[in-house]
Each structure stands twice: as C-alpha cells, then as structure tokens.
Image (tube, rainbow, N blue to C red):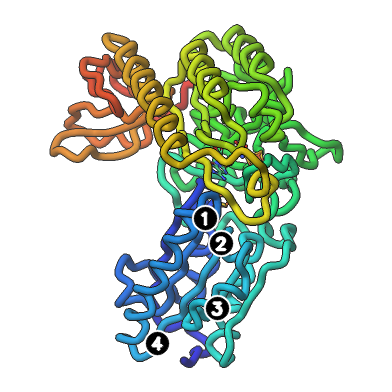
Amino acid sequence: MTESQGTPTRKRLLIRTWGCQMNVYDSARMADVLAPLGYAPTEVAEDADMVILNTCHIREKATEKVFSDLGRLREAKVARGGQMIVAVAGCVAQAEGAEITARAPWVDIVLGPQSYHRLPEMVALASRAAGAVIETEFPVDGKFDHLPEQAAPQGVTAFLTVQEGCDKFCSFCVVPYTRGAEYSRPAAAVIAEAKCLVTLGAREITLLGQNVNAYHGEGPDGGAWSLARLLLALAEISGLDRLRYTTSHPRDMGDDLIAAHRDIPALMPFLHLPVQSGSDRILKAMNRGHTAADYRALIEKLRAARPDLALSSDFIAGHPGEADADHRATLKLIEDIGFASAFSFRYSARPGTPAAGMAGIVDEAVADQRLREIQALLSDQQYRFNRSRMGMDIPVLVTGPGRLPGQMSGRSPWLEPVHFPSSGDLTGQTVTIRVTVTRPNSLSGELLAPPKPQASEKDAA
Ligand code: SAH
Ligand code: SF4
Ligand code: F3S
C-alpha cells in the first residue's frame, strides 16, 4: 500500500464502535485526526481503505464480538486484494495487545484508548511496514492536545470527555486496567471545546468520564476545579442550553455537586448513578466503598436539592458470593428508590480482576433468573416513570426530524425521546410539548409554545 505525498487522495474509513460513550467520543476524534489524511466515512467494509474497530472489554460477550467481526473483515480485506488497513482500538486493544495480531494476523494496527492522536503516524507506518504496529502505552496527556477547532460537528447533542481512567478498582471491572489511572483535563481546555461544540450547533453537552464526578482538573487560577465548579463555568456559555454528566460514582458525589443540581437550571434533572447491588455484603466484595444505606441517603439529599430529579443506575446480577438474600436486597433497593431507567448485566468474569478469583461462583442459570427479575422490575419502573409524564408540559430539545413525515423528535429533560408533529424544522430549539402518549421507551405530544427566537432560556432570564 502506498501513501501519496502532498494533497491526500480520497480514502474511505469505516469505524465500528462498541462499549460506552467514551468510545463513541473517541471514535469521533479518530475520524477527526484522520480527516486531514483524506479519509471520509463509509458504512461498507468492502469499500473501506481503512477499518477501525473501537472495542469494549467490559464483558466477555463484548470482547468475543471483536474477534467474530475480525473474521468477517479478513474476507473483505482479501476481496480488496489486501488493500485495507485494519486497526483495533479501544479497551480490547489495550487489554490484549499483541494477542490480537497473534489471533488475527491480518490486523495492521493495535492501539490503546490513549493513543488515537498518534493514528496518522501509525497509518503511515502500517502502510510501509511488513509487521503490525502496536501502541498500548498510557501517554494520556497528548490525547487531548488535538485542536477542538478541527472537530467534526456532533449535532444538537454532543459528548465531551473531561476525565478518563479509574482508580476505584471495583472487584469485577477491567476499566482501571484498560483506561489507566484517573486523569482530568484542564478546565480551560474543556471550556474551549464546549464553546467550539456550541459554535458547531450543540445545544446540549454531556460531560464524559469513567468517573466523571471525580473530576479535579486544573482551573485557570492554577488550583483544582471540581466537577461542580466546571459545570458552573460551562453554564455561562451562551447558546449552551443543557448540561449532563456521566458516569458518576456514589463515593464522589460531593456536596457542591449536589448543590449544583439545585443551582444550575441548565443541569438536567437526570442522573446516572450506578449502585450495582443493594446488599452490603456484595457491595463490600465489589469494593464499591459504600453501603446501601449510604446510597439511599445520597439519593435523598439529591432529591431534596432537585425534587424532579430522575435516577438511573447499573446493576450486576450474580457477582461471586451473591446469595438469594443479597439478590432480594437489590430488588428491595430498586423498589424503594424507583428508577426512571437503568442498565443491568449478568456478572461476567474478566481475566485479571479480583472477582475472577473469588469463591462463591453463582450458577449461570441462577444469575440469569436474578437478572430477569431485576430487569422486569426496572422496565416496569421505566414505563411507570414515562406514564407519569402524561399531560405534562415539558421542555423538549429538538434533535431533528422524526421517522414519520411532518414529525420532529427531541429529548425530554429526563432523556426520553419525544416525538411531535411540526410543519417547520425546529432542530436545535427548545420547545414546550404537552405529552399525550406515553410508551415504555418514548413519549409523543403536541407542540404548545412556539420556540423562543434564537436566545437560549438562560439569556432571556
Ligand atoms: N464507571 C462506571 C461504569 C463503568 S462500566 C461506574 O463506576 O459505574 C459500566 C457498567 O458495566 C458497570 O456499572 C457495571 O454495572 C457493568 N460491568 C462492569 N464490569 C462488569 C462485569 N465484569 N460483569 C458484568 N457487568 C459489568
Ligand atoms: Fe469500573 Fe468501578 Fe471504576 Fe466504574 S468505578 S470504572 S465499575 S472500577
Ligand atoms: Fe468498555 Fe472500555 Fe468503555 S471496557 S465500557 S469501552 S471504558
């Protein structure tokens, strides 16, 4: 394969993304750094000069998907006479490294989550070199140096990574090993990127981090800024109507962040706060560092600060040592708190994690049954939450046309998709919708007030 000099030739790039929103963000940034080399997006592997699999290692199934996809890519590469660069990025790349090229020798590049800014040089190397190019160091600093001005527009709702890595070492989790130690970007860089995203059309920004509320980036004054302080600064940006952040850890939910939910109107009343289990025994085995009572007390404080706050969480069924009583404690916690949505997973043993070596392995069928019970309860709660929006007049940020003709779609403050008939294109505006239909996963309604011209709610206030 030859690299042309000077004006880049047009090439096709396919990026497939698994895993969390940080990977979605990273994929967008990888597309950004490759664009100057002449790579434009394609959806079709057979047309692609380069394919990047941005992978997730969190559960066994996620990892296995990568290898089955690589099998199919081999055929596509052969069909193109070998004219395809295959790259594996993300957390499987970090965890497996050279193991990937050993299992799939047609892979040209393996790069960990902290190395995507080095993609152009790796592509050049891969085009010349006979062997694979592997980069799984943790030079996190360079990753974010790439200029935000070059970022491709993400649309009305955008992600912005402010923190990476994790120092918590929950028993079951690979993230501290695949993403490395906690790192917070300087506040000024985050603010600059947020302003740039708003210029590109974003009206809602979700701050991302594996432990986003552990954020402690350098402030313009040299001292460390908390996430609450950062949110206050971002709320000042004109045209930025909505803020969210994810994912948080209960242990890092400081009083100033709770107060931010009371004091910042742009901070949406929806919080994803994973608890994993309702049993103190299991929370301890998981090394979560808090009890079920701590979590309940925290939720109470949050609801006192922001009464319309809706909650979401993550749950794991069948962690080693989980007995039936522990499972019932989880169901009880779910019943008591009431979640607007949630994710739940069957425990998956991950190589190298403490839980993988623990006694008390839960039978798969038992774990599946527990997961079904958790999911039944949670989907019931989700539908109940959506039904409770019936007849309400809610602010909806319009994200674009709906699936049906003459329909627009948007997002409620609680992240529900909302559909409504509209003759005009209201993309990017916040409109008032009276909810007339509620479904398990979405709402529909009628447009009430016409949108305010240009100025955001904040400017008008
Ligand atoms: N940083 C976040 C979540 C990261 S992973 C947090 O602390 O909550 C997202 C979710 O995947 C976790 O909340 C957990 O519920 C689930 N998860 C992580 N490792 C898992 C494993 N080994 N098996 C099953 N679920 C897992
Ligand atoms: Fe994984 Fe726990 Fe860190 Fe979340 S806090 S990323 S679950 S180790
Ligand atoms: Fe998966 Fe890595 Fe995210 S393991 S969940 S892609 S941090």
Q: Which residue is mark 3?
A: 101
Instruction: Indicate the secondary structure of the residue bearing disc 1.
Output: loop
Cα–Cα gap, marks 4 and 1:
26 Å
Q: Which residue is mark 4?
A: 83
Q: Is residue 413 above or below residue 149?
A: above
Instruction: Indicate the secondary structure of the residue bearing disc 4.
Output: loop
Residue placed most toward the observer, 386 or 430: 386
Q: Is residue 37 visible?
A: yes
Q: Is residue 333 left or right of residue 353?
A: left
Residue drawn at point x = 33 percent, y = 72 percent: 45
Badge 3 local density, few (<14 within 10 Å), some, or many (20+)? many
Q: Which residue is mark 2?
A: 92
Cα–Cα gap, marks 1 and 2:
6 Å
Q: Quadrant of ligand 1?
A: top right
Disc 1 beta carbon < 8 A from ligand 3? yes
Disc 4 beta carbon < 8 A from ligand 3? no
Cα–Cα gap, marks 4 and 3:
18 Å
Residue drawn at point x = 47 percent, y = 48 percent: 200
Give the amino acid at mark 2. Val
Disc 3 beta carbon < 8 A from ligand 3? no
Give the amino acid at mark 4. Gln
Give the amino acid at mark 3. Thr
Cα–Cα gap, marks 3 and 2:
12 Å
Q: Earlier in the sequence, mark 2 or mark 4?
A: 4
Disc 3 and disc 1 in contact, CB within 8 angstroms: no
Instruction: Please give the label number shown on residue 56.
Output: 1
Residue placed most toward the observer, 123 or 429: 123
Q: Is residue 303 above or below residue 181?
A: above
The location of residue 24, given as percent across then percent down, is 48, 52
Instruction: Indicate the secondary structure of the residue bearing disc 2.
Output: helix
Q: Earlier in the sequence, mark 4 or mark 1?
A: 1
